[in-house]
Image: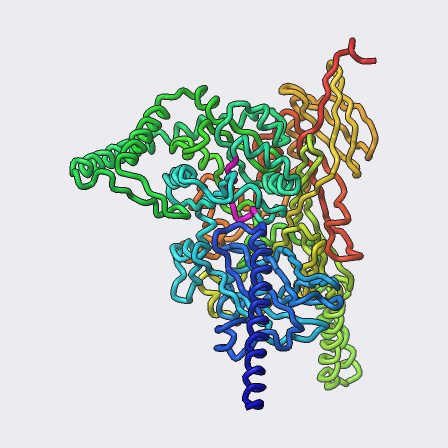
Amino acid sequence: MAKFCSIQMGCFLLCVFAVGLENVAAQNANAIANAVSSSELIGASLPTVQRPIRGAAATAAGNLGGAMGTGGMSYRIEFGQASSAGYVAVQIAIQSQATFAADRNLMFRFRGVDDEVYPPGRNLVIDVPIFISQGTNTQTFTRYLPRWAITREVAIDVLEDGRFIPNLAAEIDLQSSTGPVNSLPQSNNTNIRYTRIALRSEYELNVLKVIGTNRPTKAEFIADDSLFSLGQMSVELHPLAKMPTDWRAYQRFDVIILSPELITKLVLQPDAFAAVRHWLMMGGTVLVTGGTETKTILANLGISDVPEKTLQEQVTEIVADLSPFWSQSQANTKGVLASIKDELADPAMRGVEIGFQQTLGDPSISLEDSLVQYRMKLDSLRQAQARTPDEWADRIWTRSIAAGLVIGVPTEQSIEEPDLSVVAKLISFRRSPMLRRGVDPMIGDSRFRDWLIPGVAQPPVYTFIGLLTVFVILVGPIAYRQTARYQRSHLMFLIAPVLAIITTTMMFAYGIVSDGFGTAARIRQLTLVDGVSATGVERVRSTYFAGVRPADGLRFGGADEVMAYPESDRVAWGDHSSQTPKAIGSVTVEENNQRFDSSFLPSRSQTQFVVHRPVPKIGSLRVNVVDDSVTVINQFSFPLRRMVIRPSAKQYFMVDLINPGSTSKATPIDGKDLSKKLGGLYNDFRPILSTTNESRKFQNSGKTSDLLREVMQEIAPRNAAYDGVFEFALRDHLQTRLEIPVGHFVALSDVSDDVIAVANTEQVGCVRYIMGTFVTQETTSQEKP
C-alpha cells in the first residue's frame, strides 16, 4: 500500500512538474509573441517561425519538451514582406526559460532553400551575429538582410561558437496569405506575361497608407477602396505608432499617404520621421491628402516652399492626356449606376450589403450607399474635365526634395479618381523599386559595361601584337637564315617551339603584371543635398578589380542598401531555371556594418555594385545675396569645384573652387556660356553608353533579358531612366534641360573615403557630383553692415 501511495505521489508530482513546464513554456511563448508583435515590421500577416517546437507539434516531431540541447533558449523570427529583390526586415526575439546565466555569442544563418530561389545562381548565405547579455530574459533584434533574387523559402540555422545548436534549425515559407505570391519561372515559360507574374510588385503601384490607430475604421477601409479605381494597385494600412525607423523598410512601397495631422504627429517620432524622409529623398513619393496650408505642411516636412515650373507643366500635360480616359470612365460609371438602380428596383435587394474584396478586412456597404458613391464618382469625373489648367495647378500641388516628390491633393478621406489618375502619372517610373534604384541584381543587363575600369581585365592587344611580331622576326629572317647559313636547318624543329613557349609565357606574364596585384576602383558618387535640414542621400556606383582577391572582402555601412550589378549573361529571364543552384558568397550583417566576403570580388575580373545610403549630417551651402553680388560659404566637409548656383530665375553664378569652411565670391555666368558649363559637368564624366542589339533580339523572340527595360516599357514607355532617379535627375538638369531649378546648385568634389568598400584601393576615373538646395539670405546694400 505504501509502495502504491509513493508511486501515486510520484505520478502526481511528475504531472505537476509537467504542468509547470508547460506554463513556463506558455509564458515564454507569450513573451516572445508580445516582443515581436510590437515590432516595426509592416504587414498584417507576416511569415513567422518559432523554435524549439512545443506541445503536441513537438511530440509529433519527436522533440519532447522542445528544449533538449538548446540551453533553455527559444526564439521566434518574423520576416517582413518583400516580393522582389531588395532588403527584407527580420526581427529575432530570443527567450530564456529563466535568465541567461552567461553572455552568449550566437550566429543566425539564413540561406534560400535550393529550388525556391530564382535565379538559382543568385542565392546568398547571410550570417547575423547576436550577442546575448548575461542576466537578461528576453531580447529582440531587427536586421535588414540583402536579397538579390526572388526567394520563396529560407532555411535557418543557429550556431554558437561555430557549432550548430540542435533542435533550432528551421525553414520558413515567405509566401504569407496577405503577402507576395511569386510564381518562379520555368524553362518553358519565358514570355513577357510570365515576367509580370514573377515581378508583380514592380508593375503595381504599392501604397502605404498611414492611419492614426492600430485598427482601421470602416471609414478608412471605404476610403482605401477608392485607391483601387485604376487597378494594378496594392494598398496596406499601417498605424503611425509602429512606423519603422529604417528607411529600407519603405523601399517596397512607391507611395506613402499621410494627412497633415499625421505629419505633425510623425515629426514627434524623430527616428521614424528621419526614415520616411530618407526614403522620400531616395526617390519615394509622399501623397498628402487634405489640408490647404501648404506652407505649414512643407515646413513640418522640412521642405523648401519653392514651386518648380517643370512639375506644374507636367500636371497640365497629364490632364490633357487623361481627358479621353475620363470620358470613357464616365460612360462606364453610368452603366454601373444603371445596374445598381435595376437591383434596387427589386424590394428584396434593398438594405443588402456588398463587400469589398480588395480591402484588408471585410467591410460592407448597402446598395443604397454604393449608389451614392458612384454618383459622387460621376460628379468628380465631370468636374475634372471642366477644370482649367490654373485650377488644376491650385488643386494638385507638387514639390521635390532630392530625388523624391511630395504631392498634395485636396480630399483627405476618399481620394477622387481623377486626382489619383494625375498622381499616378506624376509618379511615372518611380512606381517600380527596381527602376528607382536603376539596378537589377538578379540577371543584370548590358549597361554593366557603361562604367568599367578602362584598361584592366582586358587583353593588351597592341602589346601582344608586338610580341608576336618579334616572334615572327626571330623565327623567320633571323633563326632560319642563321641555321641555314651554318647548315643546321634541322635545329628549327627545336628553336621554333622554344621561342613559341617563351613568347606565350611573356604574353601571359605581361597580362598579369600589367593589371597589377592590388585593387582598383572606379566610383561614380551622386550626392543629393537638402540645404534646409543639412541632410543628404547618395547613390554610389562602383566597379572593382582585384589582382588578388582581398581576404577581408568588402565592407559597407549598416544603413546602406547594397545591390550587385551583374553583367548580362545573355540568358533570358525564364531560361535561368536550368542553372545549378548555388550561393554567390557569405554576407555578415551587423548593426553598424555589412561585410561581403571575398567571393563577391573574384580575381582578375570587374565586379560592380550600386549602393544607396543616407548621409544625415552632411552639411550645407550658404549663399548670401546682396543686390547683384553673391557670396558663398562652404559648410560641407569637402571642397567644391566648378560649382554653378542659381539664386534667382534669371541669374546663374559660378565658383571655380571653394574649400571647406571657406567663403568665396561667385562670378556671374553669361547666358551663352551656361549650356557649355552645365553640359561640360556631365559630359566630362559621362558613362560610356553600351551599344547592343541584345534586348531587341530577345524582344523579337518574346523573351526578356533586360528587366529594367521591360518594366519601363510597361509602366512609363516615354521614359528612358534605366539608371535610376539619381542619374535621371542629374542628366535631366545637366544635359536635357541645361538648367537647374531656382535655389539649387551643382558641383564636383572628391570621392569620399567611406564609400570605398575595399581598403588600400587605387581610384581610377572617379567622380563625385553634389547637387541640391542651398540656404539663401537676401539683403540690400543698405542692410549690409
Residue visible at 72% across and 79% down in the picture: 496
Image position of 362 with respect to 515: above or below = above
Write the start and end of the magenta stretch as one range.
250-258
Q: Is residue 460 visible?
A: no
Residue sticking out furthest to the top: 782
Residue visible at 60% across and 42% down in the picture: 279
Q: Position of residue 500 (x, y in %)?
A: 72, 76
Image quarter of the N terminus: bottom right
Task: Tell which of 447 and 64 is nearer to you.
Answer: 64
What colour scheme was applied to this rendering of the protein?
A: rainbow
Image quarter of the C terminus: top right
Task: Tell which of 151 and 525 is nearer to you.
Answer: 151
Q: Is residue 479 visible?
A: yes
Residue sticking out furthest to the front: 1
Q: Quadrant of residue 399?
A: top right
Q: Position of residue 402 (x, y in %)?
A: 62, 36
Image position of 70 with respect to 329: above or below = below
Residue sticking out furthest to the left: 346
Image position of 139 with respect to 223: above or below = below
Total numbered circles:
0
Residue visible at 29% across and 43% down in the picture: 354
Does 253 lie within the magenta span?
Answer: yes
Image position of 63 with respect to 83: above or below = below
Residue visible at 22% across and 37% down in the picture: 340
Q: Position of residue 704 (x, y in %)?
A: 45, 56
Q: Is residue 78 left or right of residue 139?
A: left
Does 359 lie within the magenta span?
Answer: no
Q: Quadrant of residue 503?
A: bottom right
Q: Position of residue 344 (x, y in %)?
A: 20, 36
Q: Quadrant of residue 445?
A: bottom right
